[in-house]
Image: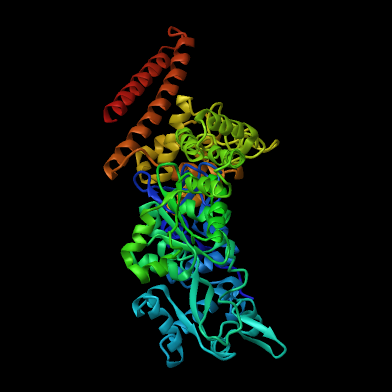
């Protein structure tokens, strides 16, 4: 077995890897001040972005849930890998050759983590299928694509391939690349019979299914030949890589445009995704044989930066009964979004691929532009189930549709749709409004409150209101009256967790100034050169938690190499464990400046305030000594104290003048 990775190599990988580039593969980040970026946290559901990344110090921190770490821990948590595997993956990303303790050379081919081996097998299979599409045996597959308006460039862009007829073409290829049968069984690309394993996909057109980072994790295969007894579409079964409830086809190609345009279009098939992208709707994705559900919504919300400032999710469904049923299922999930949700249904029932073939790219764009609010579609679909020509039918329709109106999140829209419903039913507006209000009171409108940071049904105090036993930054008590999304404020800690480190009250001006000084020290350590370091090192902090971090800075500074990533990591290792999340907070919170010059000025001003506070404290001590001193009995000491007080005052004025 391979030995442990050398510590200096781990530090080198951490230092060389751009954490923003890695996080960007999972979360849409936006600028949040000079050198800082924010997005929706990938570790918990939230409506307002509180997940902050600061590449300069190589760390991330969520001010909502308290999750924090460096690029290695981020990959560990998001890819569900061990520390060892995460370092190896990042090293491979930057082309860095790792060294191992005890003369080891790293894992052999057979010892590489199962996940990476699966990814390698899928990558090779992807390349194999794409190459096969150009062979003579794939003529039927090329014909299928051409008939649906897809040329070779489109096939290349989406990675479409072909699985040759026969039982073992892919099997032989992967065996030849060093994969064992036990490994291949885990990929989902093979079936097993009495004589062993054989190709799962045979004589089919192949679409690679990729995760958000662009790694191929599965395949979708379309039947081409009449003698194929299998289903029309055959997907990879569930594997450790491929979880269909967590996968959106096309997300790797669409993610940038989804984030830029604040739009997500959900279609039903691989060719529909292709048609939309080629028609100028590059925000289209599709589910893989399952309904659009909670896990898909988590992916979508992070890409949309679903924070209440805009954005839309558009579902396209066939106009038949199955399509309407799918749309109503989507409406049930609508409350999980802050973005507005819409539905686009082509009257003839044509899907985007058929529509593009029949009427061209503009027709696809027109379909998306014709979207209607999903709740309007849901209301009308409900009404269609009743005979509105009878009193009984109208009453039954009102009973069923009133809860739908009550679920509309925007309180300003609800009265308008109540009036619309009254018109559609031909009933008095008062009766409809009363029915909608009664439905809301019965709890039929879990999302009826105005959008806010708390989930439906959560206590009014916010998502942590009933979870006082949990802590976003372990070991700290929160200051009264502050929410979870305010930097530096966390929930109450579990009982018995180092109560000596209390969360400082941010309204305390001294604690606030001390915090700002530590932010400067962690993020801009170069500001502490020369005389500034001497002043900083001798400073006293009134807040115990901040004093502990100040002690760690004094202990770590002599070995500081100038690298900010290693600096912050060293400080985290030096402080008591409950304070490590606070170090991350201080290291990533954006400084209030937009240019390098403004940052320098801000840092100088903050340090000057800290040093002035220290001078004020020393002056107060010496004034006390002077008042207690008998000048006649100790004239020299009396004069010395006066001189020191004068020097301190001059120093204070100089600091203020410089600031």
Describe residue 233's horizontal placement relative to residue 612 as left or right. right
Q: How many marks?
A: 0
Residue 94 percent across, percent down from the top left: 43, 68
Describe residue 236's horizontal placement relative to residue 20 as left or right. right
Q: Nearer the viewer, residue 595 or 386?
A: 386
Determine the residue positioned at 58% across, 69% down: 241
Residue 619 percent across, percent down from the top left: 42, 20
Residue 50 percent across, percent down from the top left: 47, 43
Up/down of 421 relative to 136, above or below = above
Residue 584 percent across, percent down from the top left: 50, 45
Q: Nearer the viewer, residue 234 or 344?
A: 344
Up/down of 554 relative to 183, above or below = above
Up/down of 413 relative to 341, above or below = above
Query: If the image is split into quadrants, where does the N terminus sit?
Result: bottom right
Residue 120 can be seen, yes or no:
no
Q: Residue furthest front?
A: 390
Q: How is the image coloured?
A: rainbow
Quadrant of the image occupied by residue 448: top right
Query: If the image is split into quadrants, where does the C terminus sit?
Result: top left
Quadrant of the image occupied by residue 646: top left
Q: Nearer the viewer, residue 92 or 369?
A: 369
Up/down of 20 relative to 477, above or below = below
Quadrant of the image occupied by residue 118: bottom right
Describe residue 493's horizontal placement relative to residue 120 as left or right. right
Determine the residue positioned at 53% across, 69% down: 88
Q: Residue furthest top?
A: 632
Q: Residue furthest right?
A: 194
Residue 525 can be seen, yes or no:
yes
């Amino acid at each position: 077995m391979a030995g442990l990775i050398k510590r200096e190599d781990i530090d080198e990988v951490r230092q060389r890897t751009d954490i923003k580039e890695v996080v960007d593969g999972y979360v849409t980040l936006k600028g949040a001040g000079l050198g800082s970026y924010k997005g929706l946290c990938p570790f918990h559901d939230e409506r307002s972005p509180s997940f902050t990344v600061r590449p300069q110090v190589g760390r991330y921190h969520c001010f909502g849930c308290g999750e924090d770490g460096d690029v290695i821990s981020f990959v560990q948590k998001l890819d569900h890998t061990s520390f060892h595997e995460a370092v190896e993956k990042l090293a491979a990303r930057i082309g860095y050759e790792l060294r191992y303790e005890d003369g080891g050379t790293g894992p052999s081919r057979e010892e590489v983590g199962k996940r990476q081996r699966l990814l390698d097998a899928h990558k090779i299979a992807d390349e194999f299928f794409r190459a096969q599409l150009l062979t003579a045996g794939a003529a039927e597959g090329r014909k299928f694509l051409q008939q649906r308006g897809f040329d070779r460039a489109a096939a290349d862009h989406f990675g479409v391939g072909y699985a040759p007829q026969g039982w073992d073409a892919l099997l032989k290829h992967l065996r030849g690349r060093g994969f064992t049968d036990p490994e291949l069984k885990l990929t989902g690309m093979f079936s097993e019979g009495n004589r062993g394993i054989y190709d799962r996909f045979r004589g089919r057109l192949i679409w690679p299914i990729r995760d958000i980072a662009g790694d191929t994790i599965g395949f979708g295969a379309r039947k081409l030949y009449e003698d194929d007894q299998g289903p029309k579409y055959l997907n990879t079964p569930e594997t450790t890589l491929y979880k269909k409830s967590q996968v959106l086809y096309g997300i790797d190609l669409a993610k940038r445009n989804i984030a830029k345009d604040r739009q997500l279009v959900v279609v039903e098939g691989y060719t529909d995704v292709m048609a939309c992208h080629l028609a100028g709707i590059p925000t289209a994705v599709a589910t893989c044989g399952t309904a659009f559900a909670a896990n898909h919504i988590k992916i979508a919300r992070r890409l949309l930066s679903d924070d209440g400032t805009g954005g839309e999710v558009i579902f396209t469904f066939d106009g038949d009964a199955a399509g309407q049923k799918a749309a109503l299922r989507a409406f049930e999930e609508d409350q999980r979004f802050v973005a507005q949700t819409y539905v686009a249904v082509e009257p003839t029932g044509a899907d985007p691929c058929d529509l593009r073939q029949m009427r061209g790219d503009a027709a696809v764009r027109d379909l998306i532009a014709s979207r209607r609010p999903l709740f309007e579609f849901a209301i009308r679909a409900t009404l269609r189930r009743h005979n509105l020509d009878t009193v009984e039918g109208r009453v039954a329709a009102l009973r069923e549709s009133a809860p739908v109106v009550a679920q509309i999140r925007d309180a300003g829209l609800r009265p308008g749709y109540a009036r619309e419903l009254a018109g559609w039913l031909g009933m008095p507006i008062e009766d409809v409004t009363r029915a909608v209000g009664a439905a809301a009171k019965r709890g039929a409108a879990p999302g009826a409150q105005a959008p806010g940071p708390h989930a439906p049904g959560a206590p009014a105090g916010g998502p942590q209101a009933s979870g006082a036993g949990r802590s976003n930054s372990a070991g700290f008590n929160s200051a009264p009256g502050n929410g979870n999304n305010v930097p530096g404020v966390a929930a109450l800690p579990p009982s018995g967790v180092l109560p000596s480190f209390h969360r400082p009250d941010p309204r305390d001006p001294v604690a606030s100034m001390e915090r700002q000084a530590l932010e400067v020290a962690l993020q801009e350590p170069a500001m502490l050169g020369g005389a500034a370091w001497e002043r900083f090192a001798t400073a006293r902090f009134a807040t115990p938690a901040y004093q502990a971090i100040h002690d760690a800075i004094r202990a770590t500074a002599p070995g500081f190499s100038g690298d900010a990533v290693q600096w912050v990591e060293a400080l985290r290792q030096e402080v008591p464990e409950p304070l490590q999340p606070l170090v991350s907070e201080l290291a990533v919170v954006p400084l209030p400046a937009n240019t390098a010059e403004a940052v320098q000025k801000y840092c100088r001003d903050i340090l000057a305030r800290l040093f002035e506070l220290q001078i004020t404290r020393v002056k107060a001590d010496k004034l006390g000594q002077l008042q207690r001193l008998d000048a006649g009995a100790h004239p020299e000491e009396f004069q010395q104290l006066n001189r020191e007080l004068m020097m301190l005052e001059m120093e204070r004025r100089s600091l203020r003048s410089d600031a």
